[in-house]
Image: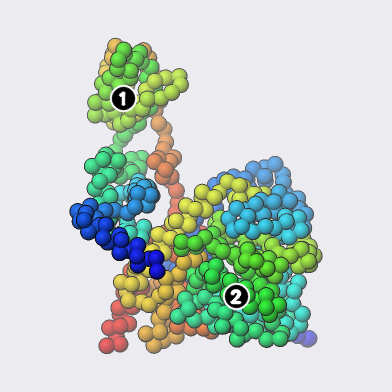
Amino acid sequence: MQKPENAEAGERRSAGHETEKTKHAAVPAADGRVEMREQILTFLEKNSKIDAKELAILLGSSEEVIAEEIKKMEQEQIICGYHTLVNWDKTEEDKITALIEVRVTPQRGQGFDNIAERIYNYPEVQSVYLISGAYDLLVILEGKTLKEVSSFVSDKLSTLETVISTATHFILKKYKDDGIIMSKKSKDERMLMTP
Amino acid sequence: MRNPIAEKAGKIKPSGIRKFFDIVSEMDDVVSLGVGEPDFDTPWAVRDEGIYTLERGKTFYTSNAGLKELRTEICRYLKRRFALEYDPLQETLVTVGGSEGIDLAFRAMLNPGDEVLIPQPCYVSYVPCAELADGVPVAINLKAENEFRLTREELLEAITEKTKILVLPFPNNPTGAIMSREDLEAIAEVIIEKDIYVLSDEIYAELTFGEENHVSIASLPGMKERTILINGFSKSHAMTGWRLGYACGPKEIIGQMVKIHQFAIMCAPTNSQYAAVAALRDCDGEVARMREAYNQRRRYLMYSFQEMGLPCFEPFGAFYVFPCIREFGMSSEEFATRLLEEERVAVVPGDAFGDCGEGFLRISYAYSLEDLKVALGRLGRFVCKLREMKK
């Protein structure tokens, strides 16, 4: 008895707010939405090639809902881009990656943001993180040669007036990057048929 | 020379999967959907604990019933996940896989001529294990229209004076069927009224995908004292090769099972037992992650069957789907053989799990999405070809 009554009441309520109802129809309830977003992001983080249709099948949702959520997360800059994880070691391309620990003097009123910006604007800089502990900024730099990296450090980085010191580490081999094991063999060891 | 073979052993039918396996192993480029074990690696925390305890030389026998530490963790886990209360010392036995528990329970409980009700399609070992224990297996043929659940009526019809044990294999291999609390309550009523016991094989308990968490029949009122619960680490923690399972039940029955286990096995592998402690302590997150991955694949499979127009009820458990292939007018074995020969896809014919599985295929989704896509592409092509030819 209760159900039809509620349904009726619900209908009556929404009749007055046509636009609101249609707006909400495409979006799952608040709780489910947070969960849905998390699931979408978890998937895209591992495979940004997947399309909305397939994602909808896997997550038990509709293509429209998924596409809408992705679009919104792009607008909100939750999704900032779609990358491909490349194992450059396997290509002909020469590339070296350096991790540079940078100690700086924070500036009044600006903290570290200003100096960070001056560093991250260089296109050869891949990442800049503010770090707790023995140094302040961790700069990840990609270059073609050792010389290229060292000249960046000596000419551009060390010469910034707030930089106190730098320590440069070169990456020799990448075992795991962004949660993916680079050299993992993927042979199925199982017997082909088991009960 | 005298015949060296015992009549009882000679009479056991070889597994229907064996023959198929032999053909598959000879072929190249086969995409298999025929495997009954997880594709995931055992969680690293578990493997690490295994290595660590090996390094420390923890390689001696444990007590017959298993490490106390492990039995305690098992009981905590069963309480946390399924609201079951067992005493680690008297009601819990660590076995070599769930399979050993099944064998022990039959041997501890059956007198010659006692009937064992076995709902089919089901895992292949209940029938031979019951026979080896001098029991008489009696098949209950489950129906597709009931989504392969056991109904009260089917159970009542199969019970005789001699019925002693009902095997309850849910979530089910090969159908993926589950039994809800309501379904189980209807069964429990009959069990109590007719004074029989239940061997509840819940090895897939962690893999259910409906709204409701898996319900163990042992958690229903009056059922704990009538139920031998079988579970293990193979499916939930991707630990098939570690060979570790457990049985829980009334102390009188477990006591007898421990006795047989003591003489036949001594104890489950020590290294696996230590690793399993880590599995229960640290791996709930990993288990959930694997479950979610299975669920996504399951949805993908259901969608693909729908696209192909292949009838299949939506299964909510284990990692199998059980589509019907009757429309093509051939036996499951014929279909599976042709699918293998013409498209290089290996599936298990449904009748390998009991006669009433005829007309169905068991398709496992313990594979990566990429593998599933390739295999389903081929299956779809095959189905189209058969339909074209029929026209």
Q: Using the image, name the chain to which the residue with label 1 belongs.
A: A
Residue A157 appears in the picture as rendered: no
Residue B187 appears in the picture as rendered: yes
The relative height of residue A187 versus residue A166 in the rendered view (above or below) is: below
The relative height of residue A156 versus residue B126 in the rendered view (above or below) is: above
Name the mark on residue B311: none
**Quadrant of residue B89 in the image?**
bottom right
The relative height of residue A52 versus residue B45 in the rendered view (above or below) is: below
Instruction: Name which residue type carries label 2.
Output: Ile
* Residue located at (30% from left, 87% from top): B390
Quarter of the image that includes the N terminus of chain B: bottom right
Quarter of the image that includes the C terminus of chain B: bottom left
- Is A2 left or right of B283, judged from the image as shown? left
- Is B138 left or right of A126, judged from the image as shown? right
Name the mark on residue B187: 2
**Quadrant of residue B313 in the image?**
bottom left
x, y percentage for residue B360? 45, 79
* Residue located at (37% from left, 52% from top): A32
* Residue located at (27% from left, 49% from top): A70
Mark 1 lies on residue: A149
